[in-house]
Image: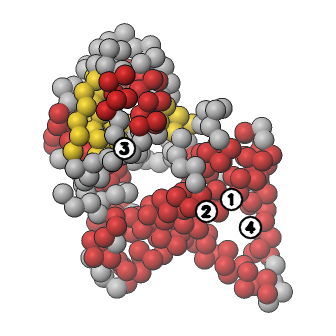
Amino acid sequence: MFFSIIIPVYNRPDETDELLDSLSKLDFNQDFEIVIVEDGSTIKSDTIVEKYAKKLNISYYFKENTGPGDSRNFGMQKAKGDYFILFDSDCIIPKNYLSEVIKAFQVNYVDCFGGPDQALDSFSDIQKAINFSMTSFLTTGGIRGGSEKLNKFQPRSFNMGISKKAFEASGGFAHIHPGEDPDLSIRLWNLGFETKLFPKAYVYHKRRIDWDKFSYQVNKFGKARPILNSWYPVHSKLSYFFPAFFIIGFYASIVLLVLAQDFLMKLYCLYFFVLLITATIQNKSFKIGWLAIVATWKQFNGYGLGFIQSFIKINVLKQKPEAAFPELFFKK
């Protein structure tokens, strides 16, 4: 099996440098290639790629800006491998990553897999807090953190593998972003392909380090989910509504508190206290524990409000997704 690693890049040469450095240290003894797709960047990574030209089998392509999904498709079309590994540029790869993928294939080969993400000690406290909120079983992040409790796993494109056969059959990613990865997973299921979580094929995901950018990102995640639910109603789940219920309940608890009814607010306080203790113990830092509360609130609030807004426009007002949220769709 010949792996092609596909990496879309947009104005992030420093991250590309860290990612390629980690790939140059893999303990994998088979050949593999790396395909860098520069998605219309104004700050290019071409000099970074040249830096690793003698260490890695690497190719570099520059194209106009059409979004990460289309850039991944472009890279897979150019790639020579029979199995594609997709990483975001803000990932750092453990040296045993490809070896763990091979081991997982020997147990259960699938045409599409996803892996979880973790945080390095060198990450900032905010990055570690965001990582906690996006991976903890106490939030909606249990799946990304490695949980296998769902019947069908939807790989996320920051750490994802897909066979050439599955890519060609599905046509790859659609032009929605975010949401292009669960959309692809569902279309693969409909074509008869299986997806699976490989828990040991994790990456270190740096994510956003700015609260406003993180809030904006999760808000777009929330907007995308009702669109996907409308496209694939059979795969809609009650758990997707949880952040919206959480936010509605929280604001309701404030109203009840004004009316001298504090029971619901006490439940929220208990939840955040458990979150604080868990994040503090897990990260061995009280500061990160407090920041994890901030990150989780921004995650729920951003996602929940985005979900509610999208649900009203898509399900109640019956607006077309492209007209309701043009910012979620890249034009080719």
Q: CA distance from mark 1 to mark 4?
A: 14 Å
Amino acid of disc 4: Tyr
Residue in the image at 72% along x and 39% along y: 283
Name the residue tied to disc 1.
Answer: 294
Q: CA distance from mark 3 to mark 1?
A: 31 Å
> Which class describes the residues within 10 Å of circle 1: few (<14), some (14-19), or many (20+)?
some
Residue 240 horizontal/vertical position (percent): 48, 63
Q: CA distance from mark 1 to mark 2?
A: 6 Å
Can residue 252 be seen in the rendering of this structure?
yes
Q: Which mark is residue 30?
A: none
> Which class describes the residues within 10 Å of circle 2: few (<14), some (14-19), or many (20+)?
many
Can residue 299 be seen in the rendering of this structure?
no
Between 88 and 136, which is closer to the camera in this rendering?
88
Q: Which mark is residue 43?
A: 3
In the rendered image, the vertical position of residue 141 relative to residue 83, given as above or below: below
Q: For the residues labelled 2 and 3, say whether their Cβ atoms are less than 8 Å apart.
A: no
Q: CA distance from mark 4 to mark 2?
A: 15 Å
Q: Nearer the viewer, mark 1 or mark 4?
A: 1
Amino acid of disc 1: Val
Is 285 on the left or on the right of 133, as rendered? right
Q: Earlier in the sequence, mark 4 or mark 2?
A: 4
Is 255 on the left or on the right of 21, as rendered? right
Q: For the residues labelled 4 and 2, say whether their Cβ atoms are less than 8 Å apart.
A: no
Q: Which mark is residue 268?
A: 4
